[in-house]
Amino acid sequence: MYKKELNSDDLLKIIFHYTAKIASERQLNAVLVHMADMGRELILSDRCTVWLIDEESKQLYTTVAHGVDEIRVPYGTGFVGSSIVSGEPIIIEDAYSDPRHHSENDRKTGYRTKSIITVPFRNNDGNIIGAYQAVNKLTEIDHFTPRDLELLSLAASYAGKSLESVMLHQEIFDTQREIISKMGEVGEIRSRETANHVKRVAEYSYVLAIALGLSPAEAELLRTASPMHDIGKVAIPDAILNKPGKLTPEEFETIKSHTDIGYRLLLGSKRELLRAAAIVAGQHHEKWDGSGYPDGRQGEDIHIFGRITAVADVFDALSAERVYKKPWPMDRIESFFREERGRHFDPRLVDAFFAHLPQLLAIRERLADEGERTE
Ligand code: C2E
Ligand code: SIN
Ligand code: SIN
Ligand code: FE
Ligand code: FE
């Protein structure tokens, strides 16, 4: 039943296998799971977790691995906490003989924690950014040794660089997403559109993108960028944007400029996310048959992000009340999309729209504006 300690060949194989995997990974979660797997295999423990420090909430958190869900604990508590605070590793033969052990977790899950090892790890600047923690040694001696400590420290130093760059990447992406969402809200407030409009457009766009066969990464990119589609409306005078009735032709010409304004606002950036947002802002009113604006692009000359956002945006505009119109009933919306298949909209997208209508309606319901929920 017991596992045998590994020889140096086995160890090298494991380290090589996982560091290669980790180096090519961009998702933080995936890096943490690979690190946990590497740690577990290297020191023959039953479970292994990688803990990171969330500076903002002053918590330590882990990701999902080895049958354990994400856990958050206040900074400084438990074995991980004291190891991270002191910067020293901890090896415990029997957790139950130590007051730092949280036995409620065992009680809840029925798992029996016995031996524990915790090793803090540092970033390139030498600051502690997290810790490895492994539970229950599976070899005959049944507790962790100084050799395990060396191996986990080694694993941490190999994975540390990749971990740090993935965390930075994640931080930048999160920051961009936050800024974009805030900017999208600015356009929304100005035109007094329903509060959840940009959120619904984002979610519809994501569903339609996946339905069309875009990769999850592209669909995610569009989900993040599409809330910006009307950012150019910040430059449109209130009297026009919020006019209760029908627009004059000149007023409509002014409104149409929101596409070019948004496009030019976002264009200069090299950031993938802002470039996607620029495309969406510039092309969400183009029509499949070439009769849209600002450029009268046709068919696949309209970027797929623009074609998708057009369906999402119009579906939401028709569903909602605007200063100039009442919400349309669903049967009228459906016949509209059928009529406009191959005219306003990409036919494949109209098909995807109908194929995924239940999902779209669930989003509309979940993100309904105050007082607009239908059930
Ligand atoms: P919006 O209100 O968000 O509408 C987005 C798009 O949904 C419209 O783009 C149009 O393609 C579609 N749509 C919305 N309501 C209707 C409708 O009652 N019938 C039909 N057939 N389609 C509809 P569009 O037409 O390029 O308009 C762009 C923006 O210009 C609108 O965004 C809105 O902010 C403004 N706008 C358009 N028409 C009027 C109007 O009569 N009065 C006012 N105050 N604003 C208008
Ligand atoms: C911890 O290190 O705080 C969790 C491990 C435990 O106490 O069982
Ligand atoms: C909106 O999306 O609510 C405004 C209509 C447009 O796309 O210009
Ligand atoms: Fe628009
Ligand atoms: Fe819109």
Image (cartoon, grey):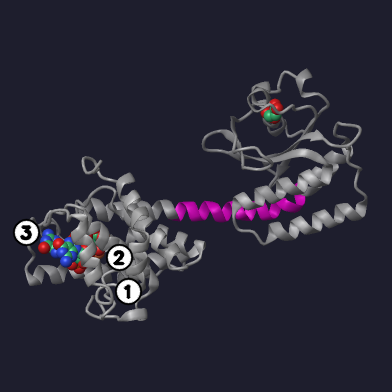
Q: Residue at x 36, y 72 (%)?
A: 348
Where residue 375 appears, as percent x and y from the top left, is 25, 41
Secondary element under disc 2, as helix, strand or loop, is helix
Choose top left, top right, bottom left or bottom right for residue 201: bottom left
Identify residue type, mark 3: Gly
Residue 245 tag number = 3
Q: Quadrant of residue 78?
A: top right
Q: Residue at x 61, y 55 (%)?
A: 166
Q: Quadrant location of the N terminus?
A: top right
Q: Quadrant of residue 368?
A: top left
Disc 3/disc 1 C-alpha distance (Å): 30 Å
Residue 272 vertical placement versus 151 (above, below): below
Q: Give the crowd class for mark 1: few <14, some 14-19, many >=20 residues within 10 Å.
A: many
Which tag is nearer the camera, tag 3 or tag 2?
A: 2
Q: Dot 1: what SS?
A: loop
Q: How far across and how far down the image is residue 366, in percent?
A: 33, 45
Residue 202 in picture, x, y percent from top left: 36, 56
Mark yes or no: residue 28 visible. Answer: yes
| Residue range of the region highlighted in magenta in the rendering | 156-176
Q: Which residue is mark 2?
A: 311
Q: Is residue 233 visible?
A: no
Element on which disc 3 rests = loop
Image coords of residue 282 (percent x, y): 31, 71
Disc 2 marks a residue whose amino acid type is Val
Q: Which residue is mark 1?
A: 346
Q: Which mark is residue 320?
A: none
Pointer 3 or 1: first along the chain: 3
Between the residue at mark 3 and the residue at mark 2, the CA separation in whole angstroms equals: 24 Å
Q: Amino acid at mark 1?
A: Asp
